Amino acid sequence: MSTPHVPARRRKLWGWGYEGERASASAVAFAESALSALLGGGPLERREPPSEDAIQLAPGRALPPASLAAFSDTSTRARALHALGRSYRDLARATRGVFPHPPDAVLFPRTEAEVAQVLEAASSARVAVVPFGGGTSVSGGVEPIVGGAYRGAWSLDLTAMSGVVEIDHESLAARILAGTLGPDLEHALRPSGLSLRHFPQSFEMSTLGGWIATRAGGHFATVYTHIDDLVEAIRVVTPSGTLATRRLPGSGAGPQPERMFVGSEGALGIITEAWVRLFQRPRHRASATLRFADFMQGARAVRAIVQSGLQPANARLLDGPEAIMSGTGAGDAALLLLAFESAELSQDALLAQAIDVARAHGAALPEGAVRSTETDGAGREATADAYKGAFFRAPYLRDELVLRGIFVETYETAVPWSGLQALDAAVRAAVASLELGPSFVAARLTHVYRDGAAPYYTVICRAPDRGEVALADRVKDAVTRAIVEAGGTSTHHHAVGRDVVPYYERERPDLFARALEAAKRALDPNGVMNPGALLRDPSAAR
């Protein structure tokens, strides 16, 4: 055994982020008080997470050959860290020290050649390979659940392949290795005054390759909502060979090859690097917070704004409970957090136009709700407001809620505007039908399009002691079924993984599924690439 890759900070084995980091005491105290009152059942008692010494894993079945020893790790810590993602279901198990499907080994390739070595060895030995970037999957995408058709499973951690390799300033693009974490990527681009401007909630812990493999949604609420739009070219290592696409601003030469791998979740190969489109860092920002009588009134205003041709960088609509949870409101109104950004031009006039549209649809503009700022583009991020701060810190608070017996999970989708109200009603009815006891649903729109929106729901209730996983499965099934039956997508930006496959199959055309399976056979003849993610692994049982 060797341990070649030692990060500067140690990740938590049982929760979000790094050891020593947690939600603030004030945030935890507020959540405890509010949830005790809302959910009843007395004060919330915290249980201690497991110590590293207490974690017991099943022995590895398939150890890497000597040729991979220089970058492999079979320690308990490495295997446990790569055994689960960070959904509520994952945290419920990890906080009790339960890691039911650990990889047999974790490999940290440092070069593309070493990635190819891993895939060759795995294909020959019939060992599954599960790609791992930051491990932030909330859909079962990194848990090595493989069936009897495989001798075992290896987790392939790409974080040793990190860095911005090259910047094309003239074309506003950069070549970046897939294992680069979000903060490292932005830090490297900052001296050039550039940014990828892709800030998912997992930003601090996730990688460029993970964003591409899962079709992640990021910072922009309109236009550049997905990483898809920012990928210019990629390199992919597959069991059948290495594939590189050409850098082009656009092309009509057949189907776009990048699109086969964007969202493929490692089922077709390993993304090792990408050329991505960049933005100049914003210097001008104009923002406002508007109030609405209810969520649907706010949704109608947002629709009118985007259909008018305006393209705000931020257009987050929060219902009352969501406003309370994010610390942006008292819960007595739906709030629209609206912002325009630019590297070159003042955005005040565009914001004023959007406010006029919103007012025509019932918006109220409180005193002092409009802000206009100008920065040098090199300091604090223009979007580092209260909502964004709460957005990035929310997973730390969720850890503490899980330890206090609170179920808190999120469900996101997208639907045409014409179906939004019916979908919203269906989700709320599905939660009500579960008879969870005192509980509540919070909602927000995270991304908006000319033809529809991406609603995002949070469900909170008390969890039965040691019944957390069963509860998570019940709620997931009810909510996701309701979403798909109401015409929404099974996932807007959290990927399919293993957890969403049954619902994804209901929206995926059968003929496309056969074409995808054929592509997998061509690229991965022995079927070792992340079996069960995106496509079912018939030999695996949950």
Image: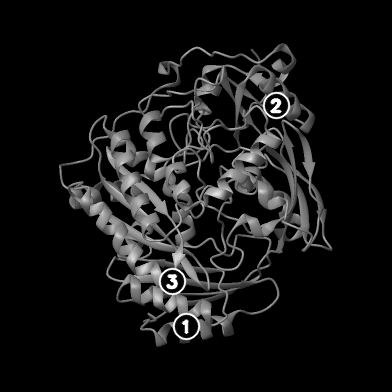
Mark 3 or mark 1, earlier in chain: 1
Q: Nearer the viewer, mark 3 or mark 1?
A: 3
**Res. 98 image quadrant:** top left
Question: Counting other residues with Cα less than 10 Å from the Cα at mark 1, is it few (<14), some (14-19), or many (20 or more)?
Answer: many
**Residue 148 x, y percent position in the rendering:** 50, 20
Q: Which residue is mark 1?
A: 355
Residue most toward the left?
41
- 10 Å neighbourhood of mark 3: few (<14), some, or many (≥20)? some
In the rendered view of the protein, which quadrant contains the C terminus?
A: top left
Is 81 left or right of 156, judged from the image as shown?
Answer: left
Q: Disc number at residue 119?
A: 2
Q: Position of residue 230 (x, y in %)?
A: 68, 58
* Mark 3 residue element: helix
Quadrant of the rendering where the N terminus is positioned: top right
Image spot of residue 272 (x, y percent) = 72, 39
Task: State left or right for residue 495 relative to residue 432.
Answer: right
Specify the amino acid type for callout 2.
Answer: Leu
Question: Which residue occupies 27% across, 29% down?
Answer: 466
Kindly report the distance in space between the C-alpha atoms of the residues bearing marks 3 and 2.
Answer: 44 Å
Q: Which mark is residue 416?
A: none
Q: Tell which circle, 3 or 2, labels the residue nearer the N-terminal end.
A: 2
The image's colouring method is one colour
Residue 88 in the image, given as x and y percentages of width and height: 38, 40
Question: First in sequence: mark 1 or mark 2?
Answer: 2
